[in-house]
Amino acid sequence: MFGKRGNDGALQVAKTLQPAVALRPASTSSTPAPVPARAAPAREEPAAAPSRSRPDSYYETKSKVFAALIDTIDLSQLARLDAESAREEIRDIVNDIIAIKNFAMTIAEQEDLLADICNDVLGYGPLEPLLVRDDIADIMVNGAKQTFIEVDGKVIDAGVRFRDNQQLLNICQRIVSQVGRRVDESSPICDARLPDGSRVNVIAPPLAIDGTILTIRKFKKDKLTLPQLVQFGAISPEGATILEIIGRVRCNVVISGGTGSGKTTLLNCLTRYIDEDERIITCEDSAELQLQQPHVVRLETRPPNIEGEGEITMRDLVKNCLRMRPERIIVGEVRGPEVFDLLQAMNTGHDGSMGTIHSNSPRECLNRIEAMIAMGGFTLPARTVKEIIVGSIDIIIQAARLRDGSRRITHITEVLGMEGDVIITQDLFVYDILGEDSRGRLLGRHRSTGIGRPAMWDRARYFNEEQRLARALDAADAGAGEAA
């Protein structure tokens, strides 16, 4: 029989041709209980595996082997083993099951099956080969039979699928339970994160008609830096220097952009230039920011419990962190009335605070901030709201994902003041699209707008950065002239 235990409690396999005998708790579920902590794979899966489409017969065989495995092992005993030992035990048992059941498989198919089943029991199932690939930006699971990924700005079919919708839902529950959240019929929408900070969204039936929908915004293992953004063409070297100075001299910054434009990545890049002696407090719906400074306090919102109570909103976090002696407040994403509290913080001694917002241009960003304040129920005159915005925000950085999939920083814009009832802004740096090449890739250039003395000049001088700012602006002017 399979899964027999010796006196030492370790899983042992007796190689016999008898049918599988269940040595496990009385549960009849065909899906393993969540392992308390995700076990890292003992070996990295081949990068090409996710894109290889497999025949239906492979999934039928996998389902039979998996069912026999679950009827054989005691998951509570398996959970006590370390990751590598648990994986080896599973591989031994699966090899015996394949031999006893006489499944006709090639060596390559058997290796794939072993890896898949280990991932099902110890990790995130079919997601594992996708998660180890560093070239994937997004994973989009549309039910059990269809998975898409974004690679190099383009969405393609991943060629992987789940055994059924129940397996997909169980993997989603495993992911969200690790951060103290849940997803089921009574709470079918959930935001969570993976251990590396990658953003996770789950929407389950009955809201998702065709099965559970899982979306993962995947972060690279090596966090991007401004020099790397320069290499990718997202910003010019002179523009990167200006952004570095903006982060260093404690300008209040709002990063604006559409979905997938790289707002969080850019925010992570800017925070690298914060001095190490500053106390930073971050407020996020799901903790994605990974700051490198030694004095960082991370706060995260909490959804309501099953009784509908206990919710902690972003506004609650921002209001509370004002009492925690922050020097900078960083809000991962501004979506609602918390924008008012962030503006108040920016305007009351917390210079260098930052946040991101969904909008398509610097002007639209300002309009959205006004709209969110109005939706929050604040009964303030429109001019007063505009004056608060002008007195709080110094810089708007616009990021965009272009139609060829590339990401560019398209504007670095200063908020200057009021002229009548209109907020006045000026662009320091812009990106011009000049055309496209034979492969459909857009061609463009970053250029200075010729502002020789920006509004942030006095702040730069206060931090002894005015000479570097002047050199960057002059170099950008010269580069734009040569390109023209």
Image (tube, rainbow, N blue to C red):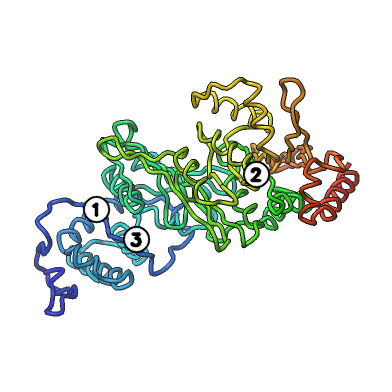
In the image, taking residue 280 as reference, residue 101 lies left or right, namely: left
Q: Which amino acid does label 2 sit on?
A: Arg
Question: Of the residues tagged 3 and 1, which is closer to the observer?
Answer: 3
In the image, taking residue 349 as reference, residue 184 lies left or right, namely: left
The answer to whether the residue labelled 2 contacts the one labelled 1, judged by CB atoms less than 8 Å apart, is: no
Q: Residue at x 14, y 74 (%)?
A: 14
**In the figure, 450 relative to 294: above or below?**
above
Q: Residue at x 71, y 20 (%)?
A: 421
Please name the residue that numbered disc 3 is placed on: 38
Q: What element carries label 1?
A: helix
Task: Specify the label residue 85 is tagged with.
Answer: none
Q: Is mark 3 on a helix, strand or loop?
A: loop
Please name the residue that numbered disc 1 is placed on: 63
Q: What residue type is labelled 3?
A: Arg
Q: What residue type is labelled 1?
A: Ser
**In the figure, 137 relative to 81: above or below?**
above
Task: Specify the label residue 407 is tagged with.
Answer: 2
Nearer-the-camera pick, 171 or 63? 171
- Would you identify the image quadrant in which residue 380 lies? top right
